[in-house]
Image (tube, rainbow, N blue to C red):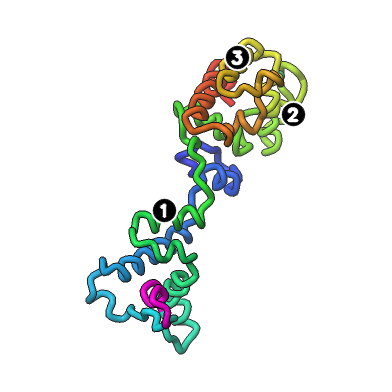
Amino acid sequence: MHIVTGAKKLTSHDLLKKDTGWPELSTRRELQQLSILHKVIHNQFPSYLVNDLPYMSDSNNRIERKYRFNPAPYNHAFYRDSVIPSMIRNWNKLPNEIRTNTTLKEFKYLYKNNFSTSPYPLYDYGRRLTQMSHTRIRVQFSNLNQHLYDHGLSNSPNCIHCAVPETPIHYFMECARYQNIRTQMINEGMAILPSINRTGRIPLKTLLHGSDKLPYPDNVKLFDIIHTYIRKSGRNP
Ligand SMILES: [Zn+2]
């Protein structure tokens, strides 16, 4: 995640996970195992490999018989926690609409949708250096003085031009030094976000993450406008 996003060392892992939306390794391992069972049920797995697997449910219900496994018998806790019993347990816990889906591709898609945080589509969008600056501001460890100060890397959180803390909102919306390029950003942003007309400002959340009220292509345009501001500011945040 550090390499892809360009985040600095010591950036909060939680914020990075939230920013990228990448699933946990354990979720990816589990999906791998469940895909094997999906293939077993749909006869896409060589039968000689699954001789020990077919604990298909003996329930009276036709759907249950087709899409469920009986728990694998075990004598020791050690075996209960091993691969086959645990994958069967995880399979049986799946919501019906996922478990009974017949296409592997859709099955994986539904599983990811159900269990992963939705991916943040724009975390790696744009020119590399600008994208890195934008991400660093989002994950709260950029070259802005407030972030450097928070990480013990600066004696003061203040902006050297305005003598107030150089926070993300100060950098984007308030700093006197960037008035001209800010006017340009706001004028261009209005075409996408009419609410700017009323307030004359772009909210910090939208500046950092885009707007969930906008379709994807408009968020891309908005990111382009914001990236231009970052580049023209010369601040390299
Ligand atoms: Zn300033």
Residue 214 location (% of width, % of height): 55, 32
Which kind of residue does numbered mark 1 sit on?
Tyr
Q: Which residues are magenta?
A: 60-69
Is 123 displayed left or right of 145 in the figure?
A: left
Main secondary structure found in the magenta portion: helix
Residue 48 percent location from the top left of the image = 22, 76
Pick the quarter of the image with the C terminus.
top right
Identify which residue is drawn at 59% across, 49% down. 14
Question: Where is residue 68, by image quadrant?
Answer: bottom left
- Marks 2/1: CA–CA distance: 47 Å
| Residue 27 vertical placement versus 117 (above, below) | below
Of pointers 3 and 1, the one earlier in the residue sequence: 1
* Viewer-nearest residue: 104 or 22: 104
x and y, in percent, of residue 99 in the image: 42, 65
Q: Which mark is residue 156?
A: 2
In the rendered view, does 55 fall on the left or right side of 25?
Answer: left
